[in-house]
Amino acid sequence: MAKCLVAQSEGPSVTVNAILAGIVKANQLDHLYDKVLGGLNGIEGILSERFVDLTDMSEYENKILCQTPASALGSCRYKLTRTTKQEFDKLVKIMHKHDIEVLIYIGGNDSMDTVAFLNEYVKEKQIDDLRFIGVPKTIDNDLMYIDHCPGYPSSAKYIATTALQTWLDFNVYTRKEVFILETMGKDAGWLAASACLSNIVDLLVLPETVFDETLFLAEIKKCLKEKNKCYVVISEGIKNADGKLIADKKISASNKLRNLIIDTNTASRCKVLELSSIQRCSVIQQSLVDMDESFNLGVCAYMYSNKAKYSGHMVTINRKNSDKYDIEYGIVDASLVIDKIKTFPKEWILDNYHGITKEAYDHILPLIDKNTNIIYENGIPAYIKPYYLNK
Amino acid sequence: MAKCLVAQSEGPSVTVNAILAGIVKANQLDHLYDKVLGGLNGIEGILSERFVDLTDMSEYENKILCQTPASALGSCRYKLTRTTKQEFDKLVKIMHKHDIEVLIYIGGNDSMDTVAFLNEYVKEKQIDDLRFIGVPKTIDNDLMYIDHCPGYPSSAKYIATTALQTWLDFNVYTRKEVFILETMGKDAGWLAASACLSNIVDLLVLPETVFDETLFLAEIKKCLKEKNKCYVVISEGIKNADGKLIADKKISASNKLRNLIIDTNTASRCKVLELSSIQRCSVIQQSLVDMDESFNLGVCAYMYSNKAKYSGHMVTINRKNSDKYDIEYGIVDASLVIDKIKTFPKEWILDNYHGITKEAYDHILPLIDKNTNIIYENGIPAYIKPYYLNK
């Protein structure tokens, strides 16, 4: 019996704490470890031995943790690489010193790198008492070897809802105008595409499609002629035919398009909305599927964590080939996942920026279909004060 | 028996349709009128005789209408003035032609002008078969002779929730940084002040306080020294000591402050979030108090609408002097309301941008305390397709 260390890394989401809650709860039921420790601010905090003891979390705290957005343990953008052996060594020493036998690391692509590299390192050094497990989460939904990433369904639900609501707001005046909603997504269009679940999007531009100025403006004109309004959704990472980003350091992609629309007299009014961090922290739009799956993926990571052969692996979600939405949990070598990006399938994108196919819609819909019951205190969602603020 | 005409004007909110639903429902129960017509796009559409018949709206449609954000009848920014007598005359002719005996106009300050002016006009012309009633709604909460305006509680709830959630998101990294949340509010700070219900706001700047650059930067520095982070909330309409707006045509107030913070090296990172139209159309954060009061205010307007002596009046909400939050509905001469602005009370603002007093908190809290049960369809809130889109 020893300790299990859990940490969170990279951009937060509304279910990243449900994964943590699942791990803590699993140990309360199964007692594989004496203690479940939280490492504060990811690898960065672990290297400074900043820990918090989560072992005896109450049932209520566990429940509220599941509806607390953003990483309750704090996060970091700190990236271990194969060349940072000194830090690997330091980390191993810290784990030994604190009697920690497993690190469960919750994060995106860079965090799966960390899991794979640390496992490589201990294998190479023939250290056989330490294990590393990765739990994926990224609202970008761009990891390979997983049907969809925890955090994505809730952000997709938020974006579809927000598209609908801002479209209703945008339509009330008779004036001719364009609205541009910009979502996150540097390399993959999953988030922007989810706006189409609202069934109101006129034009959609993803990083996977070439942004062609002439075609885009022609489509806006056509839409304005027909409806007097045009509702556009784009990813932050849209690119031209040369693969060059539309956004630059000074101006976002949506504001660039806005200026283009105004300067070419395509429309005299164009409103821009950049969703920024709200799209990854709105618990009110938490998807029940996302919450349940995130919690279970935490339990799953815990279950695999005491088996040496799964060190260096990432737990995963596989969609079953069934009529009704169903999944099963699995595990995959983290080194397979790293440095790859799962883009939005080209065959799911309609021509002329006309949105997504029925198949794409049917793929995303079950992920956003149900809601969690949020507990409120004084008019706002109850939340757990981040653990890193108590240290 | 004749017809009642209802129309909506100015910026939409998440409960402006609950007012409409209340009026329609009241006539289904009381049958004062043969028909309840909706005028599309406010006065603008009424002058073009664009109507829709709402008399027999189903129970389900009524319910879903209450959770549909933005004006289902469309809106306008068209402002009648005392000098536009030709249009008054045209409107009177249209009302007579369609056998409409009352116009219930739902809107903000400019709409109460319309109600007062039309009433003056018919009195002057001794036309005694037409009546005009105003129903207030504005998320800005800046109308006089009403405790709080329908639409404000829901936007306040949205802003408090969003402040909390983006604060949690903003805190996860250890880096030193400033966050600026910008809410609507050109003249009054009610919306920005509501962010303080989250209990996380470090600095608050309202249009009612003078924006003093030196003091503001000193307070940011102090806060960063203490916590490494500083969460700032401002209204779009903040002004300097000369009463000059901080924002200009090219740049928002929040981006202006961001540049100031960066250029003076007060912090090297500063994130800005402008809530834009989301703060007035997010039904998920609908306040139950707001929804109920808005519906009831519609019923109330209907009840007063067949009494000649109340023509030219606006229905209102008065808070009772009781321990537990309670209100009563009333009516006030619309001409008293026009051209006045209810600002956020100076005595409720703490010095040095430190937020709001306990009294202010206690005033706003009961307005945001409870939630409505939103009905979903395919993962997003069910809604009524705007009536103006069917015409």
Image (cartoon, coloured by chain):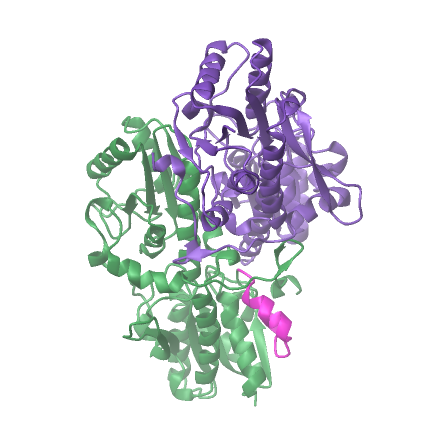
Chain colours: A purple, B green
Residue that extends furthest to the bottom in the rendered view of this protein: B1
- Residue B99 appears in view: no
State how many labels appear: 0
Could you say where residue A287 lies in the image, as x and y percent from the top left? 59, 48
Asked whether B242 or B290 is in front, the reply is: B290
Q: Is B319 situated left or right of A348 in this image?
A: left
- Residue B348 belongs to the span the image colors magenta: no
Residue A15: quadrant of the picture? top right
Q: Is A195 situated left or right of B332 in this image?
A: right
Q: Does A94 sit above or below residue B384?
A: above
Asked whether B316 or B361 is in front, the reply is: B361
Could you say where residue B147 lies in the image, as x and y percent from the top left? 32, 69
Q: Is B126 situated left or right of A140 in this image?
A: left
Residue B28: quadrant of the picture? bottom right
Could you say where residue A141 lies in the image, as x and y percent from the top left? 62, 34
Residue lying at 23% horizontally and 50% vertically, measured from the top left: B209
Q: Quadrant of the C terminus of chain A?
A: top left
The residue segment tinted magenta is B49-69
Q: Is B49 situated left or right of A358 in this image?
A: left
- Residue B52 belongs to the span the image colors magenta: yes
Asked whether B180 or A21 is in front, the reply is: A21
Could you say where residue A188 lies in the image, as x and y percent from the top left? 63, 31
Residue that extends furthest to the front in the rendered view of this protein: A1
Q: Does A108 sit above or below residue A364?
A: above
Residue lying at 57% horizontally and 22% vertically, measured from the top left: A131
Residue lying at 40% horizontally and 61% vertically, measured from the top left: B368
Q: Does A105 sit above or below residue A363?
A: above
- Residue B138 appears in view: yes
